Amino acid sequence: MVVVLTGELFDAIEVNAARTGNHKRAAVRMSRLAVQASPSGMSRAEAHVRAGEQWLLADEPATAAEEFRTAIADAGPTFDDPRVPLARAMFALGRPAEADALLRELTESGGRSLPRTCDLVAELLTEQGDLAGALDWATAGVDACLRGDDRDELPLLLRLRYRLRVDLGLPEDDYDKMLDNKKAQRGGPAAGV
């Protein structure tokens, strides 16, 4: 039987997993669906990424890493770059050198020009205690937002960046001031750092 993958189907599985706490069951189901899916709905790569995320939530990073690698090999479109959650899995597996290599690869391939990728990497580095690295990625994300049209990520990145600067004991800068400035929401001029 060929299954057409849809975002709605995977959303429903994720909501059920969040409600029940049974992420392993969701991961197993998503992994099976990703393998037997028709390429006409959501991409197989996206299905593997979302299955991998459930495996991470089920505290099975090795299986999650397999899903993320499958997504990368598939090369289909994904909402988020699968190298970010793969790096998270590598950190969880105690393989920081591999995680760092993935983050370098993201930098070299232009990931710092994508606000969503910057946000995800900054969050990951924050979890790992690398606040300076997280601040660098968050700042790159703000810069990318201000250069482009992505205003959805801007307030998220500004808040994350502000928290990181406070934790690092850094003084307020012009980007921090944008949090109170409505221009940040409407796309006003970029503030200097």
Image: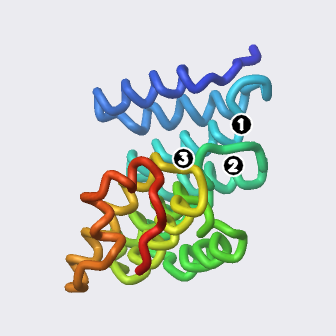
Identify residue type, mark 3. Gly
Residue 112 seen from this side? yes
Give 190 or 81, whichever is nearer the viewer.
190
Query: Quick one: SS at disc 2?
Result: helix
Whether residue 86 can be seen here: no
Residue at image mark 3: 52
Mark 2 is surrounded, within 10 Å at the Cα level, by few (under 14), some (14 to 19) or many (20 or more) other residues, namely many
**Horizontal side, residue 169 vs residue 75: left or right:** left
Do the numbered discs 2 and 1 sit on residues whose CB atoms are within 8 Å?
A: yes
* Image quadrant in which the C terminus is located: bottom left
For label 1, count other residues whose C-alpha is less than 10 Å away and answer few (under 14), some (14-19) or many (20+): many
- Where does label 1 land, which residue? 44
**Residue at figure coordinates x 24%, y 85% from the top left:** 170
Q: Which residue has dot 2 on it?
A: 71
- Give x and y (percent) for residue 113: 62, 65
User: Separation of disc 2 and disc 1 at Cα?
Assistant: 7 Å
| Colouring used for the render | rainbow
Q: Compared with residue 25, is residue 127 higher up or lower down, i.e. above or below?
A: below
In-image side of 169 versus 135 (left or right): left
